[in-house]
Image (cartoon, coloured by chain):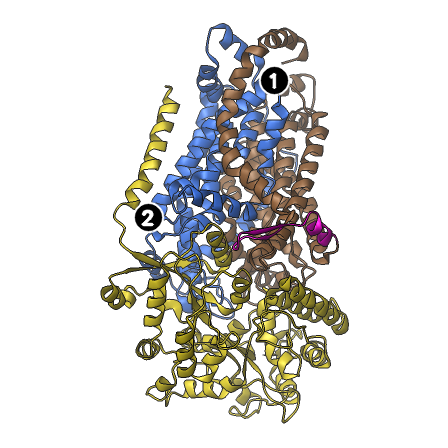
Amino acid sequence: MTRGSKMLAISLAILFLIPAIAVAGAAKTITLWYPAGDITAGAAHFGDKALFTEFEKKYNVKVEAVALDYDTMQQKIFAAAAGKNIADILFVDDSWMPGFLKEEMLEPVADAKAKAWLDAVSPEIKELSDYGKGRMWGYVQYGIDVYGLTWNKDQFREVGLDPEKPPKTWDEFREYAKKLVKRDAQGNITRVGYAIRHVGQPHGIVHKHFWAIYGAGAALVDDHRTLRGGKTLINTPGGKAALQLVLDMLDVDKSTSLNFPDPRAAFLKGIASMQISETVSIRARQPKEAPDLKWGMALPPVPKAGDKPATNLGGWLYVVPKLAKNKAQAWQLIEWLNSPEKDFELCKKYNASPRYKVNWEKEPFKSDPYDQGLKQLYPYGIKLPINLGFNGIMEATGNAIQKVWHHEASVDAALAEAERLANKSIADATK
Amino acid sequence: MISERRRSPRQVLARLHSRHVLHAYLFIAPVIVLFGIFRVAPSIQTLLYSFYKVELLRGRFTFIGLENFYSLLTDEIFRKATVNTLTYVTTIVPISAFLGLILAVLFNAKFHLKEFFKAVYFSPMVTSTVAAAMVWWWMYNPQFGIFNVLLKLVGLPEQPWLMSSHMALTSIIIFSVWKNLGYNMIIYLAGLQAIPPQFYEAATIDGAGALRRFRHVTIPLLAPTTTFLLIYDTILALQVFDQVFVLTGGGPAGSTNVVVLDLYRQAFERYNFGYAAAEAMVLFLFIMAVTILQYYYSKRYEVAY
Amino acid sequence: MVRSILVPVGRLSLYLVVGAVAALMILPFYWMLITAVMPAPDILAFPPKWIPTRLTLEHFVAAFAKAPWLTYYWNSFVVAVGSVSCSLLFGLFAGYAFAVYRFPLQNFFFLLILGTLMVPVQVTSVALYIQLSKIGWVDTFLGILAPNFASAFGVFMLRQGIKQIPVDVIEAARIDGAGEMRIVLTIIAPLIKTTVATVAMILFLGSWNDFLWPVIIINSADLRTLPVGIALFKDPYGNINYGPLMAATLISTAPMLVAYVISQKYMIRGIALTGLKG
């Protein structure tokens, strides 16, 4: 053999040996996949090696929590499921659920357990967990997202607004934003009254404008609890008004700008006075990123006085794929991790809002101002539609919003197209 | 090597051809077999999916013939993605090749700090596209990014970069040029260094100046390299994904949506794997056609030794 | 032999232009570097700071603590060496065959190899994954290497390089009685040193930075390659981790810069030794 071929043979031999060595000595292990980063604002604790020790000892099972890159996680889950080689538990974004359900990828929660959970948790968790007629496909994680209006109290004071009184109607909202916007000598905006999210994934754009769409009486789909069928209600006077609101703020009031792409970062940096997004993320980031920021949190404004406010609820779920190899242990772990005791212990440790009604009665949650503030927001929280055509609806709507605010299409044209594409997506999903 | 002298060895070779057929197959066997199993088979499988409604996770495949393709024809998002992709390719391939050539010529000469500068021009290639794109995302930020800071410094107006549907694609193109410069440069360098000096000497003796030597010796003799680069760059550019995914996600308003990104969304967010495969099929056919065209067109210019 | 093509604009202007453009080229690296060494409040400062108030290694410490870098390096190294050596070896032979021989179905096979570049890896990855899980290669080194045992780019470029070798040389060797395999390894390979070094460099870079396939095929934390490991430093919704992320990226990039410098030295020496360019 020539030298090259010899080297090749040796390298290949080594490569074949390595997996053999790795496989030796495997105890019963269940795997859990979760996205890396603070993105989940609560899953950070999966990195804590001590989290599962109690469980591992009790059930004589090893738990391997593997962090994955969030951006490619859906692709990875899909490939793994297709190859029948998937983790036992997945920690996923609830907006991914319709996709999973469409492919019948998940194992449902046992009926009895589901009923027990739904009875024991507070209303907003129940809302997020129930996928129609008491069916549950996973357990909702603590520290759920609810969107709220956050504002910079010092900046309110600076322009003569009462820092404890957020705008309640759209008119007030526009007035406040006009007062709060700041410009430099050349007339460029250096601080926006309200920061808008208009770039990036279409889903995110819709999330951040959900409050206006639903507040004005429009909806992404007529029944947000059914999996199949229905139609979108985005191309309605309410939908048009929702898009028009920000368009007016951009063009007429000039109190906001397309140049501030990340509302939360802008808010934390003090170059946006108001923004509407997940409050839990501001609460988590503010101490580190803007320690001096004094902020308030309230329901988003409504079109006119007396209207019912709307905001979105979202969260993360523990789910078990049908093709998981250790389903029994997987459910055991999930139930253990989401028991009332663990709920209390972890929420206290990680400063998150609990799920069980009994825990809300206990300190520190009972008196915590942030948690109590959240309680004001929860009743108006609307879950995202679980329609199987969800992704198409979100993309169509997000694109329409983007086109309108980028002056690429009129409100009517964009919404008409969004309606057409969203309905098509709903129809396609039922085929 | 002038064509005159070539006839004799060629004739000898022709006689030996049948002897070498076995060798030929033996030599290409590893590549063909390994590719066959690990790349060709999955590719064919994927392309075949385009004729089915694919429910991969349920294991259900329903044959629907050309239905996916009919839907593609009326899909305006796909159409826009195609236009964006073509705009991208027709811009970046010539620019990259041209700049690569200039740089290669430059670095073929001798001057102080040449190796240092060469390393600097090559450095963007060293990082992964994803990491570099993340850095550029931040640099393009209208408020915090260095580009606008620099523009302001020299008194030029600040730009929206990735925030504007008119500028986003251009911004991505600028990134891609930066990223691929080194690659084009060293390929051309390798090609330049392969040109035997006799040609330059002959040309100089004939009285040709630097520019004429460049036009009549360098460029023609670089033709194979140019062909290679154009073909390879085009194939890759038509499949651009990483930087678009990171920098804009396809927006704003679909202005940077490209075919592979659209296909990715269809596959992994909408679970329309068959439809995604149809997009891949269309892309594949297009790339194949363009490559064949480029190849045959280039044959006319290839100069043998 | 005159190599310089310095137009009468003057050396000084050349240096200025080259230098200015080089500064622009390196700007992103500058940002990466200072972000990795400046304290967190500076990163988040507004207006943005382009000169750090002070230097700190806290991000490197955090990055080192957060991930098993040695494991990542080793995995990336094994994959890169395995993939590049196979690709070079197989590519050399295949490139030779395509460049020198004429055989039936030659164009078909060449187009086949080129064709593997034409279907986006994003979708073929799923079909390949399914295939590999059937033979138990998921989450193994072999799995990562599977689509990378050979390289179409390698074949293409080596063929290009070999085509430029005068036929006489090959003929002479044959007349001397050398077998084809010996010709390829002992005569052809040294003659195209620059091409081989270039291909090796590019393939190594490609393997080192390959993200999409490793992320799909790797499940265990101890099999992760560098790009997969670095992706975990990303924080899609929060910006506060740029410090450790940049530190992590620099840690990953450093060896490649070293490899580049080495390959360049090798190329220069190669040219000087053989006397024949290429």
Q: Chain of mark 2?
A: C
Range of magenta residues: B53-73
**Amino acid residing under circle 2:** Thr
- The chain letter corresponding to yellow is A
Image height of A30 relative to C150, above or below: below
Residue on which disc 2 sits: C71
Indicate yes or no whether the magenta region holds residue B27: no
Q: Residue lying furthest left in this view?
A: A57
Classify residue B231 by image quadrant. Answer: top right
**Where is residue A118 shown, x and y percent of the image?**
43, 80
**Marks 2 and 1 share the same chain:** yes
Residue beneath the point at 41% across and 39% down: C80
- C271 is higher (above) or lower (below) than A155: above
Residue C102's disc is 1
Residue A197 shows in this picture: no
Q: Label 1 amino acid?
A: Arg
Q: Residues within 10 Å of mark 1 (few under 14, many from 20)?
A: some
Is C274 on the left or on the right of A56, as rendered? right
In the image, which disc is placed on residue C246?
none
- Location of the N terminus of chain A by quadrant is top left
Q: Residue at x 58, y 88 (%)?
A: A159
For chain B, the rendered hue is brown
Asked whether B67 falls inside the magenta stretch, the response is: yes
Left or right, C114 with respect to C36, comes to right
Question: Looking at the image, is mark 2 or mark 1 earlier in the sequence?
Answer: 2
Image depth: mark 2 or mark 1 in front: 1
Quadrant (top left, top right, bottom left, bottom right) of the C terminus of chain A: bottom right
